[in-house]
Image (tube, helix red, strand yellow):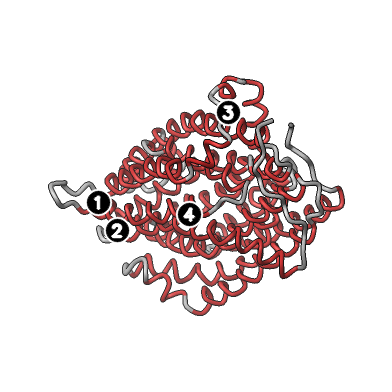
Amino acid sequence: MTEDTTPDIPAEGTAFEEARRLTTLAWPVIVGQVGFILMGVVDLIVVGMLGEGPQASLALGNTWSFGVLIVGMGVLMGLDPVFAQAAGARDKAVMGRAMVQATALGLLLSVPLIVAHLLATPALTLFEQPAEVIPGAAQYCLAIAMGLPGAMVFFALRSFLQGQGIVRPATLVIVVANVLNVIVDVWFTLGGFGIEPMGVYGCGLATSLVRTFMPIALIAVCWDSLRGCWPGIAPVFEARALWALALIGLPVGVQVAMEVEAFNFVGLMMGWISPAALAGNAVALNISSLSFMVPFGFSAAAATRVGNLLGAGLPWGRTAWVAIGVGVAFMCSSALLFFFAPGVLAGLYTADPKVLAVAVGLLPLAACFQLFDGAQVVSFGVLRGAGDTRVPPLFNLLGYWALGIPVGYVLGFKLGWGPEGIWMGLILALMVVAVMLIVRVRVVQRRGGARVVVS
């Protein structure tokens, strides 16, 4: 084992002390994730200047693209307990091997993700999306595909650093990337300085360039931390170890994918209604995604803190429940904003009256599921840190696909409730999933969690 310079993991303190520790870990993740979402916000706003059609094309393309990308992201998120528990056990050898193998795994995963992006046209046609918006959506996906290898390497390295509680560098990189994204987005989409306007394709190309920049910048900022665990490239060729790592992350990838694909399928159902419904749904989801980033940050913090404590052989139950409580408390406050100011929020994205009407109608429903959304995502982070990754995907299968989507379809189309009816299915799904995950946290806590670190 290499010489260990990893700091000792502090044992659980009072609820206030745990909340403070979790907040310290969470806020850079929150800023980073908000920054990641803001790239999509900028895309919607800039393309929205071109009208309802291009904005609907981008919304559809982003729906397909993110639905594909999240599978790879989820697999790499599933490696959180490996890094966090190894850091808690002060095992830098495991951390180093996992870092190299996770990076290689990310690059391997980018290949099928690129292929899926190139198949956007037949896929969206199969899902009976509006014919007039599919070409623009396919152009966007083609451009986005170029930046997928960079994105996957960034997520792998961020997971490695996050497992050690090193969260600020990735946040800094994402903040800088957002500034670059605004500049290049406007430049490529609307044209200028010798470049002809490229519309939706230019928007995707700008995002790809920024995503390629992100891992390079992260390596530069964190060179000492990465070099300190560098074991050489030999672990890349340990096929059995690479496969074992993939099996740890795959259940999380499936769980995250089933949740995100449910929301994406809702977007596809909106496309069956009208381009305005498609764009309005994208606006409402983008707004709710921003508030979701706070409990998502605490989910990541919980995965790190619980994993560190479990790896160090220390109790972690109080940390788990404090994290869940903080996530729920924040989402209650965001729910009030969505309920009382939907027009103000949606008006920041679009002035199109049809798109605005759909978004304003959906945001009060987003307020209804905020509490459940916060509870489920933080509970998922707790379970991830505790090494429980195989059972939670079943909850998403039941909540979203056996209940939420069918109910939303019936309410939206069979009963004629439209976009609001479809979102009622989401509320049901999130409520069911949240309850099951909270119960699962209690069960896993009693069992003490599962160790995934192999020294």
| Mark 3, secondary structure of its residue | loop
What element does badge 4 sit on? Answer: helix
Residue 49 image offset from top left, x and y in percent: 26, 61
Q: Name the image quarter holding residue 455.
A: top right
**Residue under pointer 1:** 189
Q: Which residue is mark 3?
A: 231
Q: Which residue is mark 4?
A: 171
Q: Amino acid at mark 1?
A: Thr
CB under 8 Å between discs 3 and 1: no
Q: Are marks 1 and 4 in contact (CB under 8 Å)?
A: no
Task: Tell me which amino acid carries mark 2.
Answer: Val
Report the side of 300 relative to 270 (left or right).
right
Q: Are marks 2 and 1 in contact (CB under 8 Å)?
A: yes
Q: Amino acid at mark 3?
A: Pro
Asked if the residues shown at circle 4 and circle 3 are in contact, with their CB atoms under 8 angstroms apart, the answer is no
Alpha carbons under labels 2 and 1: distance apart? 7 Å
Residue 145 placed where, x, y %? Answer: 39, 37
Q: Is residue 45 left or right of residue 127?
A: left
Earlier sequence position, callout 1 versus callout 4: 4
Q: Secondary structure at mark 2?
A: helix
Q: Position of residue 358 (x, y in %)?
A: 43, 66
* Quarter that holds the N terminus: top right
Which mark is in front, 4 or 3?
3
- Between 31 and 329, the residue placed more toward the observer is 31
Q: Residue at horizontal 52%, vertical 76%?
A: 337
Give residue 46's mark. Answer: 2
